[in-house]
């Protein structure tokens, strides 16, 4: 099997695929890539199924040596990559020859970048997925972020290199939005009119301690009117929960499966990949939409992803 | 979208791809059994388009494929399941025993808990081991069982400031609940002891030591026994 040698791990680099859905009854959340659109596209550029395991880098990339070479693509945020000091384009497949090293720096755009490799990264699956669930130390590469000196295996037989790139016009339609659209949360009515107005008219900042479990927001607190008696219940991905202090938290892919705080809103499915690109100190605004609008936006997004012109050879 | 009802059951959309089913507005054994029965029925006869289930005390969150189903489609498909809940019975509950080393470094909050209730540490331990608990559901993190049945004399609110890291195996109490932390996670429950048992092991066929509906008892062990079991 071909290898990837980790010469520099970056800040927080994990193995991720599209996650493990269906294990809520065990308390296991899906995990998976924070920006699944970037992962899906990156995998298609190297000829993989969309769900193949890749490396998710956070804020700062790393240095990766390919002793036997590999066919690669970078997607998501731009980490200013160079292959043996020659710049490589993101969103385009390229070939690393045996012995070449890929260097990635600090992000120049959003929070997360993906390094996809033809064949995918081979790790032992946990509940059918290669995704790392860092809080519980399960899945991925030894259940943890990569360290210097780690050696990863590349799965699958190699196919000849074909240059593929993502059509820029369609990519711009799929890129993260400045305003996150939301549907009402299951406890929206617990928040008085004034709290709702504040929530939808304010600008929040993603706090430093945000991670794959949740994004803490700094900004106006949104008090709950009745100190309603909340019983712990199942929580959905993208739920905006408001603990006692009134500062909202967006529950993210490594979320707890249940929780006991009221939810004022829920980020729509189509805008969740963009949440994975929010960096600490990034501004966040919310806009309310109906369930019907949320569904049609998701349909439009999937149609763009299925478009014949999206991947160009 | 407003709440809709089916008999005593309430439906409420939680997001564009999830629906909450409430069996009751407070914790009860009857509601818990409805949750367990619905889970069982959906496992035996899955509905196409349902992606995930998050059970809790008296509700189930159903996550679905929003490209295939709308909330009202899902409600329509769920109604016959809800009508059939009382037909089947649940399997006899399993009995599980969890050895716990109480107090000291194993349960740093035991002293404060017993002081709060004007009990000696030993009385608090005796109370905790006297009860038979029910696993209402697994949630929060892999293998975390929400146990109901804590004696009233031990009911204590959560810590005002959650710990950033709770050691794995820690046995905590919060309100009327008790539970065991399977992993080193943040946590706001008051820690009264620790078990050497692995609560969640991915290489074990059942993975989670506890399942929904299990009956659980705690047994006190010494630090020496803890060390022996931990290394076993």
Image: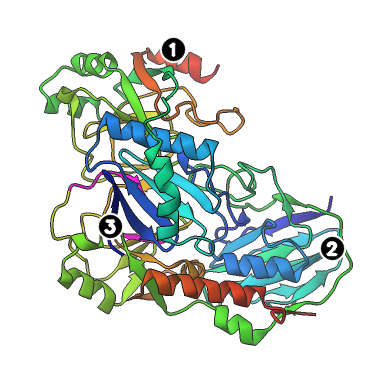
Point out residue A15 in the picture as x, y percentages from the top left corner: 63, 54
Q: Is the N terminus of chain B in the top left, top right, bottom left or bottom right quadrant?
A: bottom left
First of labels 3, 1 by sequence position? 3
Point out residue B214 in the picture as x, y percentages from the top left corner: 40, 23
Q: Chain of mark 2?
A: A
Q: Residues within 10 Å of mark 2 (few under 14, many from 20)?
A: some
From where the camera sits, is residue A107 visible? no
**SS for dot 3:** loop
| Labels 3, 1: one chain | yes
Q: Looking at the image, which residue is at 59% across and 27% down?
A: B204
Query: Quick check: A76 left or right of A103?
Result: left
Q: Chain of mark 1?
A: B
Q: Residues within 10 Å of mark 3 (few under 14, many from 20)?
A: few
Label 1 to label 2, Cα distance in Å?
A: 53 Å
Q: Main secondary structure of the magenta part?
A: loop
Q: Which residue is mark 2?
A: A69
In this view, the residue farthest toward the bottom is A169
Q: Which of the labelled discs sits on residue B3, or is there none?
A: 3
Q: Nearer the viewer, residue A231 or B99?
A: A231
Is residue A234 rendered magenta in the image? yes
Q: Which of the labelled discs sits on residue A106, or is there none?
A: none
**SS for dot 2:** loop
**SS for dot 1:** helix
Q: Nearer the viewer, residue A5 or A48?
A: A48
In magenta, the rendered stretch is A229-241
Point out residue B126 in the picture as x, y percentages from the top left corner: 24, 13
In this view, the residue farthest toward the left is B118
């Amino acid at each position: 099997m071909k290898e990837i040698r980790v010469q520099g791990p970056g800040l927080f680099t994990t193995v991720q695929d599209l996650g493990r859905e269906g294990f809520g009854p065990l308390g296991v959340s899906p995990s998976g890539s924070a920006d699944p659109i970037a992962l899906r596209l990156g995998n298609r550029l190297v000829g993989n199924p969309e769900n193949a395991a890749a490396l998710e880098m956070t804020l700062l990339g790393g240095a990766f040596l390919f002793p036997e070479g590999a066919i690669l693509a970078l997607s998501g945020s731009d980490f200013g990559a160079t292959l043996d000091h020659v710049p490589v384009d993101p969103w385009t497949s390229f070939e690393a020859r045996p012995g070449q090293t890929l260097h990635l720096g600090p992000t120049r755009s959003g929070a997360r970048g993906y390094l996809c490799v033809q064949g995918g990264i081979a790790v032992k699956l946990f509940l059918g997925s290669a995704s790392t669930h860092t809080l519980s130390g399960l899945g991925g590469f030894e259940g943890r972020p990569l360290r210097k000196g780690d050696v990863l295996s590349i799965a699958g037989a190699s196919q000849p290199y074909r240059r593929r790139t993502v059509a820029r016009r369609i990519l711009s339609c799929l890129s993260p939005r400045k305003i996150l659209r939301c549907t009402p949360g299951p406890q929206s009515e617990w928040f008085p009119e004034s709290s709702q107005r504040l929530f939808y008219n304010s600008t929040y900042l993603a706090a430093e301690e945000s991670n794959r479990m949740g994004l803490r927001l700094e900004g106006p607190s949104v008090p709950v009117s009745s100190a309603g008696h909340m019983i712990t219940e199942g929580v959905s991905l993208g739920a905006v929960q408001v603990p006692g202090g009134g500062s909202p938290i967006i529950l993210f892919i490594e979320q707890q499966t249940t929780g006991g705080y009221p939810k004022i809103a829920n980020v729509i499915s189509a805008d969740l990949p963009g949440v994975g690109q929010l960096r600490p100190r990034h501004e966040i605004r919310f806009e309310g939409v109906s369930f019907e609008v949320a569904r049609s936006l998701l349909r439009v997004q999937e149609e763009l992803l299925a478009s014949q012109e999206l991947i160009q050879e | 979208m407003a709440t809709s009802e089916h008999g005593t059951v309430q439906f409420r959309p939680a997001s564009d791809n999830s629906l909450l089913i409430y069996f009751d507005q407070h914790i009860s054994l009857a509601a818990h059994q409805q949750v367990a029965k619905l889970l069982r029925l959906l496992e035996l006869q899955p509905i196409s388009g349902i992606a995930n289930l998050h059970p809790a005390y008296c509700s189930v969150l159903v996550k679905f494929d929003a490209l295939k189903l709308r909330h009202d489609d899902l409600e329509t498909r769920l109604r016959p399941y809800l009508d059939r809940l009382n037909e089947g019975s649940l399997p006899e509950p399993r009995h599980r025993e969890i050895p716990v080393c109480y107090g000291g470094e194993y349960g740093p909050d035991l002293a404060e808990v017993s002081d709060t209730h004007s009990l000696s540490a030993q009385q608090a331990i005796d109370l905790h081991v006297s009860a038979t608990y029910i696993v209402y559901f697994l949630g929060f993190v892999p293998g975390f069982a929400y146990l109901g049945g804590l004696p009233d004399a031990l009911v204590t609110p959560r810590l005002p400031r959650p710990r950033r890291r709770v050691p794995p195996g820690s046995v905590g109490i919060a309100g009327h609940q008790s539970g065991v932390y399977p992993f080193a996670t943040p946590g706001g429950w008051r820690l009264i002891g620790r078990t050497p048992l692995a609560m969640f092991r991915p290489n074990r066929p059942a993975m989670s030591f506890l399942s929904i509906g299990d009956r659980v008892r705690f047994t006190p062990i010494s630090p020496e026994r803890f060390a022996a079991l931990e290394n076993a």
